[in-house]
Amino acid sequence: MGFLAAVEEQGIEPYPAQEEAILELMTGNHVILNTPTGSGKSLVALSMHFKGLAEGKRSY
């Protein structure tokens, strides 16, 4: 199961900026996410922990 599917299964619907950033990061691109406080940047960061762990890497 992918990260976005897992998030949506929990009843969380990502904002468009979150979804776009996550998809870019998952494909190896770099992003600058400049959104207001409380707009979900932490969820985007969490997606990279998910990706790292799924690939057998360490995540801090």
Image: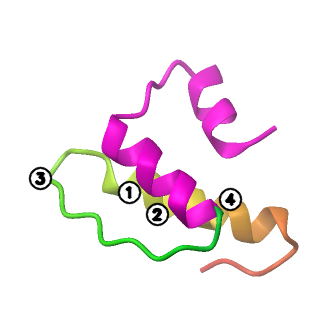
Which quarter of the rendered picture does the N terminus lie within?
A: top right
Q: Which residue is mark 3?
A: 36
Residue at image point 58% right, 33% down: 7
Residue 35 or residue 24, whichever sits in front: 24
> Of helix, strand and loop, which one carries label 4?
helix
Q: Which residues are magenta?
A: 1-26
* Image height of 19 relative to 9, above or below: below
- Name which residue type carries label 2: Ala
**Cα–Cα gap, marks 1 and 3:** 12 Å
Q: Which residue is mark 2?
A: 45
> Of helix, strand and loop, which one carries label 1?
helix
Q: Is 55 on the left-hand or right-hand side of 34? A: right
Give the mark, 3 or 4, whose residue is nearer the N terminus: 3
Residue at image point 35% right, 37% down: 16
Q: Which residue is mark 4?
A: 50
**Cα–Cα gap, marks 1 and 4:** 12 Å
- Tell whether label 4 touches label 3 (CB within 8 Å): no
Q: Which residue is mark 1?
A: 42
- Name which residue type carries label 3: Pro
Q: For residue 2: magenta?
A: yes
